[in-house]
Image (cartoon, rainbow, N blue to C red):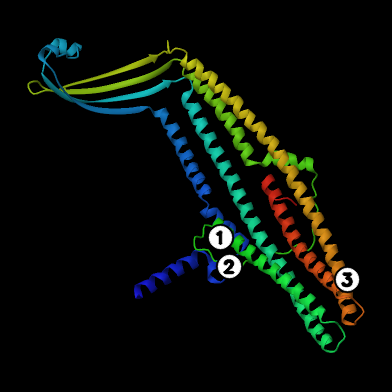
Amino acid sequence: MKSVLIAFVAVSIVLTMRFPCLAGNPLTLQTAIQEALKNNPSVQVYEKRLTQAELNIKIAKTAHWGELVGGAAIHRSEDDLLVSPMTPRKMREGIDFERTRWGFDLTYKLPIYLGGKIPLSIDISRLSEISTRLALKRLRAIVRHNTTEVYHAILALNGEGKAVDENLKALRSVLRHTELAIAQGKVPPVDRYKIMYSIRRWEAEKDRISNQQEALKIALQTLMGIKSVDTDVSLKPIPFPKRISPLAQDIKSLYARALATRSDLAALENRVKIASKEVGLARAERLPSIFAVGGFQTFDAPDTSGTEEWDISLQLKVPIFDAGRRRTKVEAANVKVLEERMHVFELRQKIIKEVGEAVKRVKTTEALVNSFLSRVNLGKEVDRVETLKYENGAGDIDDMLRAKAELAYSSSQFVASVYQWLTARSYLNLVLEEEVK
C-alpha cells in the first residue's frame, strides 16, 4: 500500500511539472499551444522527416567520393576446371594450379562523369529538405489555430455562462420582490410561476453551457496530448479587446500577401523544381558514364606461395539498348512536372478562395459584435424600465421577463461574437501565415 502511494505521488509530481494547469494554475493560451505543438503526432512525424531529409543531403554529397568495396572468397574446383588469371608475371614464373585457393580483394570506384547525376541528386535532396521544412511550418500553423479556436470557444462559453448567471441573479431578486407583492395582494400568484418557469429555463441553459464547456476542455487537453484529462481545468482569460478594429488592408493586397507567404504553396513550387531535376536525372541515365577503378587482390593456396595483384583502369560505360526504358522514364518525368504544376495552380486557387472566406468571416463577426453591442446597450435600458414598471405595479410581468431574457441573450451573444471575431482573425492569420493588423 505504501509503494502504491509513493508511485501515485511521483506520477502526480511529474504531471504537475509537465502540465502546470493540473496544479491549480490557470492554463494560458500560450501554454496550450506549446503543449499541442510538442505532443502533436503529425508534427513529430514531420520533424522526423525533416531529420531524414537533412541526412539525405549528406548521403547525396558522399557520392562524389566514390566507393571502396572489400571482399573475401575461397575457391575449390575440379582439376580440369581450374583456371588461373594470366598475368605477365605468372607467365614468367609459371602458372600454378591449385584445387583450393582463398584470398581477398579491394576495389575502389571513383565517378568521373555521370552526366550530372550527383549535382542533381544533391539539389533534389536540398529541395526536399526545404519542402519538408515548409510543410512542417504549415502544420504548426494549423495546430496553433486549432488550439486557439478551441480555447476561444471555451472562453466564449465562460462569458455566456456569466451572462446567464447575472440573469438568474436578477430573476431570483425579482422572485423575492414578487413573493412579497403576492403576500400583500398587489400581484396575482401566477406571476410567481412565470418567474420560476423562466428561472428553470435559464438553469437548463446553464447546464447546456456547462456540458459544452466540459466537452471542449476535453478536446483542448486532447490537442495538448494530455491523456488523463481534467474537466475542472481553468483557463486564463485573454485580454478582451476594447474595440473591434476593421481590416485595414483591401482584399486584393491580402490575396497577394497570401500567395507570397504561404509555406504550403512554396513547398509545392519546390516540388515542381524537384520534378524538373528528376527529368535531368532521367536524361542523365541515357548519357555515357566514366569511372576510375582501382583494384587489389591477393590469393593463397596450400602448396604455393601467396600472390598479390593490382590494377588501375578508366572505364567508359555507354547505354546501347534497353527496349526504350530510359526514354520512357524521361517522358514519365516530364509528365510529373506537369502534374506538380497543376497542383500548384489548384493550391493557388484554393488560397484565393480561403482568403475570401477568411475576410468574409472577419467582416461577418465584426457586424455581429457591433449588432449585439447595440442590443446590449438597448436591452439594459429596456430591462431597467420594465423592471421598474413591474415593481411599481404599472407593468406586465411578461414584458419584464422578455426584457431580461433579451438582455441575457444579447449579453451572452455579444461575448460569443467577440471570441468568434478573435477566432476569425486567427483563421485569417492562418490563411496568410502572418499577423494581420
Residue 77 placement (x, y as % from top left):
13, 18
- The disc at residue 221 is 1
| Contact between labelled residues 2 and 1, with CB atoms less than 8 Å apart | yes
The mark that comes first in sequence, 1 or 2, is 1
As helix, strand or loop, the secondary structure at mark 2 comes to loop
As helix, strand or loop, the secondary structure at mark 1 comes to helix
What kind of residue is marked 2? Val
Cα–Cα span, label 3 and label 1: 41 Å
Asked if residue 245 can be seen in this view, the reply is no
What kind of residue is marked 3? Val
Query: Which of the two residues, 67 or 321, is positioned nearer the viewer here?
Result: 321
Question: Is 405 displayed left or right of 317 in the figure?
Answer: right
Q: Which residue is mark 2?
A: 233
| Contact between labelled residues 1 and 3, with CB atoms less than 8 Å apart | no
Q: Which residue corresponds to the image point at 81% horizontal and 53% vertical from the top-left?
A: 246
Q: Which residue corresponds to the image point at 71% horizontal and 42% vertical from the top-left?
A: 354
Question: Is 404 displayed left or right of 217 in the figure?
Answer: right
Q: Which residue is mark 3?
A: 382
